Amino acid sequence: MSIKTKIRKAIKDFFQYEKEGDKKILKRALSHIRYENGYLIIRDEKIKMDREEDVIGVFLANIPYIVLGKGELHWDLPDKVIKIQNSALKLLECGINDVATLEIYLVMEMALRSLYSEYVKSGVIIQYKDKKIKVNNIDYRRLKLYIRRKGWSKYKVKVNGEVFPYSQGSLLSWAEKFMDDKLSFVFRLSVNVRNLLAHGEVEWNLFPTVRSLESASHASWLVFQKLKTYMKS
């Protein structure tokens, strides 16, 4: 079995947010990697591996870099995102690979939550059945808590006329209006790996790189730029 087939098979076994068109994006991404003499070469990055089987862990820990290419660390992101980004840098320096990978992808998940917070920061109208309530100074976390404390069905709540993205999957779907197909794939697959890590379900040796964090940071920055354009239109 080729290394690319192994990677495809591993992803198929857990990818719950898969969409039509992802296979084409993945095929293009896999063209950027090759295994030579104990090294996996990803674009400009060369990673030493003891076993060829570890290519799966290299891929899963570097999804943003492999798919999107070089990025950069952005420091004009929301404070919560920056805090996680700093933590990821420290973990990479310490070589705590599993937790570093979790933090890299947590940067992206927090970017999505912060993106929604930015989207509603000027205040919202919350609608549930025949009730309408105006709420100011709210963010994504507090809005979720507000709905839960009210005992309302999360499926019937609307915020500013839109269904509230209560779950991780619905938040990803909501945020896709600020992404192209490739960026959407990176967020969906990265967050899925983050979920596996959070529940101790990762069975591979992970090899995250600073390049991956840089690309994750840039991917997060891109959605905020799209939101700014959207809010001005």
Image (tube, rainbow, N blue to C red):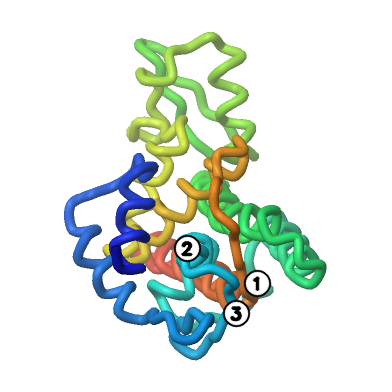
* Residue at the image position 53 percent from the left and 41 percent from the top: 195
Residue 27 shown left or right of residue 136 in the figure: left
Type of amino acid under label 1: Asp
- Marks 3/2 in contact by CB < 8 Å: the verdict is no
| Mark 2 nearby-residue class (10 Å; few <14, some 14–19, many ≥20) | some
Measure the C-alpha gap from mark 2 to mark 1: 38 Å
8 or 136: nearer the viewer: 8
201 or 104: nearer the viewer: 201
- Is the C terminus in the top left, top right, bottom left or bottom right quadrant? bottom left
SS under mark 2:
helix
Image position, residue 144 (x, y; %): 56, 28
* Residue at the image position 63 percent from the left and 32 percent from the top: 142
Query: Which badge, 1 or 3, comes first in the chain's sequence?
Result: 3
Image position, residue 160 (x, y; %): 39, 35
| Mark 1 nearby-residue class (10 Å; few <14, some 14–19, many ≥20) | few
SS under mark 1:
loop
Residue pointed to by mark 1 = 76
Query: Which badge, 2 or 1, comes first in the chain's sequence?
Result: 2
Residue pointed to by mark 3 = 48
Type of amino acid under label 2: Glu
Type of amino acid under label 3: Lys
- Marks 2/1 in contact by CB < 8 Å: the verdict is no
Image position, residue 192 (x, y; %): 46, 46
Query: Which badge, 3 or 2, comes first in the chain's sequence?
Result: 3
